[in-house]
Amino acid sequence: MTDSIYSGLTQLGQNAGLPDSPEKAVLETVPNPQAGVRYMVRFAAPEFTSLCPLTGQPDFAHLVIDYVPKDRLVESKSLKLFLGSFRNHGAFHEDCTVSIARRLVDAMQPEWLRIGGYWYPRGGIPIDVFYQTGPAPDGVWIPDQGVPSYRGRG
């Protein structure tokens, strides 16, 4: 990469494999070129997977991550690799959802962040997990996450 605000990135534009675990994943950030402007960023991961920590069976979720940045943005390839690192990670739905949010907050220090974890049923019970850092900021358009509650076949 050329010498720019993006020159410190180690994964974007490189052959970067999927990390073995979320702990080994590197979340990279870049300076926000629109710092001082309040806006919302949304990432949707409709095919998120992790493992049940007891049975090893796969769990599936549709994640929606919204944040209002301050000085840093998360680089999307590093986010994709971080989320992919959960594929072989055993944790309950609540732990996965909240730990993703907390890692993002630690990496970026956004003005505000929320995550919706819309988990598909296992054992007949869908589990939806929601986390946010505080009230939504005034003056920023925060749309609904757009994921309906699980309705089954009915």
Image (tube, grey):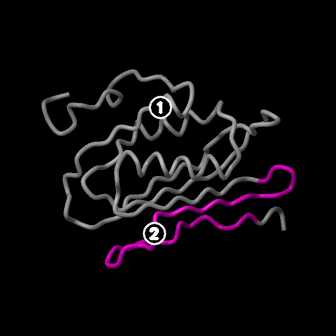
Q: Is residue 102 left or right of residue 75?
A: right
Q: Which residue sits at x=47%, y=22%?
A: 17
- Across and down, in percent, residue 115 comes to 53, 58
Q: Which residues are magenta?
A: 121-150
Residue named by callout 1:
25
- Across and down, in percent, residue 10 comes to 31, 27
The kind of residue on which mark 2 rests is Gly
Number of other residues with Cα within 10 Å of mark 1, as a class: few under 14, some 14 to 19, many 20 or more: some
Overall secondary structure of the magenta section = loop
Which of 147/28 is in front?
28
Which of 64/36 is in front?
36
Q: Which residue sits at x=45%, y=73%?
A: 135
Residue named by callout 2:
134
Q: Which residue sits at x=47%, y=39%?
A: 80
The kind of residue on which mark 1 rests is Ala
Q: Which residue sits at x=49%, y=28%?
A: 24
Which of labels 2 and 1 is toward the front?
2
The C terminus sits in image quarter: bottom right
First reached walking from the N terminus: tag 2 or tag 1? 1
